[in-house]
Amino acid sequence: MKTINEFFEVLKNNFNDAVVELKEDIDSYIVVKADSIDKIAEFIKTNNDFKFDFCTCVSGVDDANGTKNTDENGNVVINGGTMSVFYHFNRLVDDAKIIFRVYVERENPVVNSIAMIYRAADWHEREIFDLFGINFTNHPDLRRILMPYDWEGHPLRKDYKNPEFYQGIRVAY
Amino acid sequence: MSLKTEELVLNMGPQHPSTHGVLRLELLVDGEIVKNVIPHLGYLHRCFEKHTEALQYFQIVPYTDRLDYLASMGNNFGYVLTIEKLLKIEVPERVEYIRVITAELQRIASHLVAIGTFGIDVGAFTPFLFCFRDREIILNLFEEITGARFLYNFMAVGGLNYDLSNGWVDKVKDFIKYFRPKLKELNDLLSFNKIFIERTASVGILPADMAINYGVSGPMLRASGVKYDIRKNDPYSIYNRFDFDIPVGQGLQGTVGDTWDRYWVRVLEIEESLKIVEQAIEQIPEGDVKAAIPKKIKPPVGTAYGRVENPRGELGFFVVSDGGNNPFRVKVRPPSFCNLSVINEICKNNLVSDVVAILGSTDIVLGEVDR
Amino acid sequence: MNNLVQEIIVNLLLAAAPLFLWILPYALLAVYLERKISGFMQDRLGPMRVGKWGLLQSLADIVKLLQKEDIMADAVDKKLFNLAPLLVFIGSYAAFATIPFSSIYIGSNIDLGVFFVTAISALVVAGLLLGAWASNNKYSLYGGMRTAAQIVSYEIPTAIVILSVVIIAGTFNLKEMSEQQTANIFNWYIFGGPELGLKKFILIPFMLVGTVIYFISSLAEVNRTPFDIPEAESEIIGGYHTEYSGMKFAFFFLAEYANMFAVSAIITILFFGGYQSPFGYLGNLLNIKWLVGVEQIFWFLFKGLLFVFVQMWLRWTLPRLRIDQLMVTCWKYLIPISLVNLIIIAFISLL
């Protein structure tokens, strides 16, 4: 099996509800449910038809599709809507690729972690937690990775506002 | 009588000569033996991904230079390939050739730095300067065509910002002729030095399954014996036209995947890159390098993941477009970031000196790890 | 009484003479040489700006170091911190007191010359360890511990090799040793000493082994590459001198170079004829007595600097060993070999 359509058929049969749809794109991806990504990851790693051994990339995206409101300070705040996590997997033998997308609620972003299945995802998930504030359940060591440990807010969210002070030091300029 | 011993926390970095930038490793040491390594990143975080959301597509190219600053050409290449994939445009032949030549020269330059600094890490100073002497020539070549020695901003979406200058091709040929014997000199001085082999062979062994699981790529993955190179396995640009090998670690001096293998794979890759440059420079066609550059870059809504084999491994760009002038989201998959994540596994239960050697052999660039 | 005071003062001045006339200028010269030599080995020029060919570079460096602020962290043990560079300096410079630079000049012609040099050099370890501990810095501590382990271990093969030469020479006096190796290059101890006969020829290979072992362990004793792990800058920053700055750092620095010359001087005296010329003297030919002494000084410094050069050469060629490999080299190879060597030489000398 090499194409994402074939992969999608098998996954749909095995996980029915958890696998939502196949989205056509430049790199087509499969939309799956956030609470079952770990099971699917386990499946594509161990199943003989899949054997995806290489987790290339895990990336977060703030979809910014909620309602935009202005708070009392005049800052734009996005309420509701979703954020996404993209998973790129790769099979080293024949370089087949599979891409998953997971939607999470913006207000309560929780995804099951795949860090213990693919250790490569460990730091990527920490990065997403750091920059988007998406929580990964069962992650072994969910700390900030790029920003300082005591930083407030998640910079890559679309409604992120630069803080004026960091530890009493003026940072805005 | 038994003495009570205590474990000590040794902070290696962020200001330390051999962390290759501002990386902080928190070492838990028992005497000279390292029990645990906790890396702390982010000292060089420059918000690249946040910046991209406020910039137009073509404006991002100079920012990519600064990711892996030792391999700017490769970064340019990866980014423009991804945007071209998003835009579905074809670039002229000449552009492809020039891109491949510059990227491979850049790979040689980058590996020379990797080898040289690795030499310093194990205490050999002279190979470092020999490597820099030869790298200097490549930088001069780049300076001639881009005007910059380090951060080139050379490639544009759909083409190149500048064409080659007259006589540049001959200078590259001269360089190859000059450089081949220098590689032998390097091998005599460092690669097969008894002390060097003692220091690096069978140290910090990274087994193939662990390397794959941790998402390690590039020379580090190949040193573990996995024959995977994006240039061969998933050829982008025109790499399928060239004849070259993928060197893999064979454990010549110790175990497969040890520190010496990681070093040796880089030396062999320099040789392979020279081969590619030699072939490409003969075939380079005439043409206009700016012909296919779009006037306005406004990709359709969609996502694309483009990747290239950078000197340090798989450099990926994941771009989400909302149809506007600016990208909605650009995520970089930095090879150094993934390669560094395995550091704890391979440093455990080694000596402090080995940690330095192993870190040197992973060849990270902090500009890319922290972005 | 007056005579005694006079004698003491004269002796003091004589003993201090090599320090001021040679060792201090030598340290400056050696730093310059090191940079130039490394430069040429690495396809570059080295210092070129201060003076012609950068000749005054090390002078400028010393001026800079003198002007530098003497930084001392709050948490250091101030007394020990200040004492350490002095101890190191004293240890390495006092060794020159008994070294015969020529037949007309020796600081102090004591009978236990070799003994004195080995003993006083050991003071350096104490100084380094003191400085490392007083710095209250983990890297310094690492450097100090490594130094202590390394120098103490490598003193054993050094001492054993010295003993084997002493057996041949029959004296501890460095000047007498030098005198024995006179006249002819084949009278040098590396070629079995001055006594002719079968004994001499059997001795040659063992003396060669001794020379090599002594040279290797002397490298380790002065912390030069490939044994520079106590100050391995890529691993533990600067080791014991991480926290030192300005003139105190310069003390460590100069002491290292002085030490380099000290071990080269010892190796010259023990194996390469001390101050003796390999070809005979111009002074004897022209019948000018004092010229012989001057020539001897030249030969001594020449041989010494030759070994200093070899040390530099090795430093810019070889990578650094690891601490366990260093210990293995010493305890598993050098000590047993030198011991066996000593026993064989002892038997040969009984022949």
Image (tube, coloured by chain):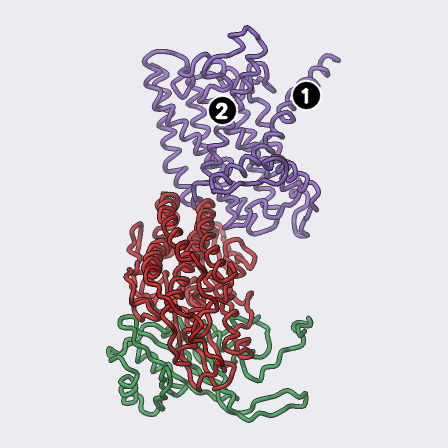
> At 75% across and 13% down in the image, what residue appears?
C2
Image location of residue C25, percent across then percent down: 62, 30
- Work out whether residue B54 can be spotted: yes
Image-quadrant location for residue A149: bottom right
Q: Nearer the viewer, residue A169 or C240?
A: A169
Which amino acid type is shown beneath numbered disc 2? Lys
Chain in green on the image:
A
Report the residue marked by disc 2. Answer: C303
Q: Nearer the viewer, residue C270 or C3?
A: C270
Kindly identify which chain the residue marked by label 2 belongs to: C
Q: Colour of chain C?
A: purple
Q: Sequence-wise, which precedes: disc 2 or disc 1?
A: 1
Q: Is residue B253 rendered to the left or right of residue C288?
A: left
Q: Which residue is mark 1?
A: C13
Q: Residue at x 39, y 39 (%)?
A: C329
Q: Colour of chain B?
A: red
Horizontally, is C351 left or right of C45 in the view? left
Callout 2–callout 1 Cβ contact below 8 Å: no
